Amino acid sequence: MLELSAGRRRWLLFVSLVAVSIVVATMSALYTSLPDIAVAIGATQAELTWIVDSYTLALAALVLTAGALGDRFGRRATLIVGMALFTVSSALPLWLDSPTWLIALRAVAGLGAAFVMPSTLSLLTASFPADRRGMAVGMWAGFAGIGGIVGLVGSGLMLQVWSWKSIFLVYSVIGLLVLLAAFTIGESVAARHGRPDVAGAIFSALAVGGVVFWLIEGAQTGFGEPFVVVALVVAVVSLVAFIGVELRASDPLLDVRYFRRRGFSTGSVSVAMQFLVIFGLFLLIVQYLQLVQGYDALGASMALAPMVVPVMVLSVIAPRITDVVGLRVVSVAGVGGIAVGMLLLSRLTVDSGYWDVLWPLCIAAAGLGLSTAPATSAIVSDIPADEQGVAAAVNDAMREIGAAIGIAIGGSILAGRYASDIVEVLPGVPEAGRPAVEGSFAGAIEFGNAAGPAARPIVDAAAEIFAAGISDSLVALGLVAAGAAVLLLFVAPGRGYVPQGDVPMGDDRQGDDRQGDVPRGDGQEGDVQRSGADTGAGADASVDSAPSQL
């Protein structure tokens, strides 16, 4: 464990929470600003999609490799690299604002986030003693959970003050401050390094990146498009190859046999389901509030702000609840609560009021708060200390894959319902206005604004269809969450489960030559203490005891 004073642990916690908050917040921050970006730079709908999703693709594809690099070269070092990439790529759009540049820079920012997310979590698990680790992980999970809400609210406020570029300005300034702060925290790095698992890194990137690309592009252009099908084939073949490589490697990037451990597998499924539903919800509810209810960007963002309270409160206390009732109860109750919230929200119509939105949102938020910290803790607690970067990366990868699936499910069902039902309205639409009305509900609103009161019945009919599509999407998300809750009821461990983080899979590995712990400076086994000169920051540092994977 990284030996730090209580004050330095609090400082590390603060830096880590701010870092993870901004890299998650920037995922949703552009949702409310896409109409302004489209007008300002002339971006097409496909370009707007990739301005948002190139970030997710890069993050999901590379986070596992980034986590392993943190174990090998230092978790503080990868945090610094990640924040540098994130900060620079967030600042450059202030000048390089063409669609192509924005897509490329968002991908670089996603690469930076891939380094930031696992490094912040693994630094916390390496720095906090066992009796305080649950609190730290709970706060990390809570801030990661509310980051999407913070991004929506923050961007709504910024758009009231300045243009869409203010979002990039604010995140680049905060990123710079976190980058400077990262130099003041201690380092944690594995003491010994096995052979780099280059093949595992390549196949993991192709597998995760392929499936995320398939989901994103398939939802936009159709899952039957040839290049979309090719992406899925590449993902499946790469996944099979990755599993084969990892089972044979002496120092694998990720020993896939860890998924046999019930805590690890339960946490992975739970995290994926949480973010699948919540990010699908964000996509749908923002459109409902803005297009159906007529909220502006700030109003829609503020309408979601109350979700922060139950997420944060329950994330902090959920580890204590888990100690009492067990992982199975909190996992089933949390994911089940998310399912209940989605099914209640599916009752929304064009005539619903804010109260009809608020209380189901709070139920879903309570479910997220109850389940997110225990799930993250279960993942990292079932993996040895020297592989905490990879464990954190698995947690992050499951979040991103889940979010991509949720957005694809919600967006596809909504688009399909609108496209199939709007044809009944088109005969009453003038020929010149049909492409706009048929293309999207936003287009129907623009047509109505241009055509005047005579077009009101057409817009009202389109609104009913759009609201019905949102309802169908929310039902689908709710059923997915309900199914996951039932699965967790049978597979999640109960109160008697003991995390197996201290039990490596070494007996199953070929050629494993691990040795004992490296002595600490105080003569005990464990971490190696470094002086301030060694770390370059005046903070304590540690070297973990076993080899990393990359």
Image (spheres, helix red, strand yellow):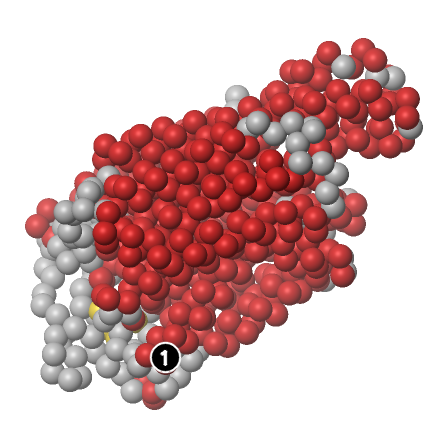
Which residue is more in the foreground, 1 or 119?
Answer: 1
The residue pinned by badge 1 equals: 8
Residue 323 coordinates in the image, percent (x, y): 23, 54
On the picture, is 449 further left or further right than 42?
Answer: right
At x 29% / y 64%, what residue is drawn? 133
Residue at image position (78%, 15%) is: 426
Image location of residue 116, percent across then percent down: 44, 61
Q: Residue at x 59, y 52 (%)?
A: 305
The image quarter containing residue 174 is bottom right
Looking at the figure, which quarter contains the N terminus? bottom left
Instruction: Give the left or right position of residue 399, taking residue 465 as reference.
Output: left
Q: Residues within 10 Å of mark 1 (few under 14, many from 20)?
A: some
Q: Can you see residue 463?
A: yes
Location of the C terminus by quadrant is bottom left
**Residue, x 34% and y 40% (percent of image)?**
333
Q: Nearest the camera: 268 or 317?
A: 317
Give the left or right position of residue 164, taking residue 314 as reference. right
- Looking at the image, can residue 401 be seen? no
Is residue 416 or residue 448 the one in the foreground? 448
In percent of width and height, residue 7 lies at 36, 80
Type of amino acid at the residue the image marks with label 1 = Arg
Quarter-of-image position of residue 71: bottom left
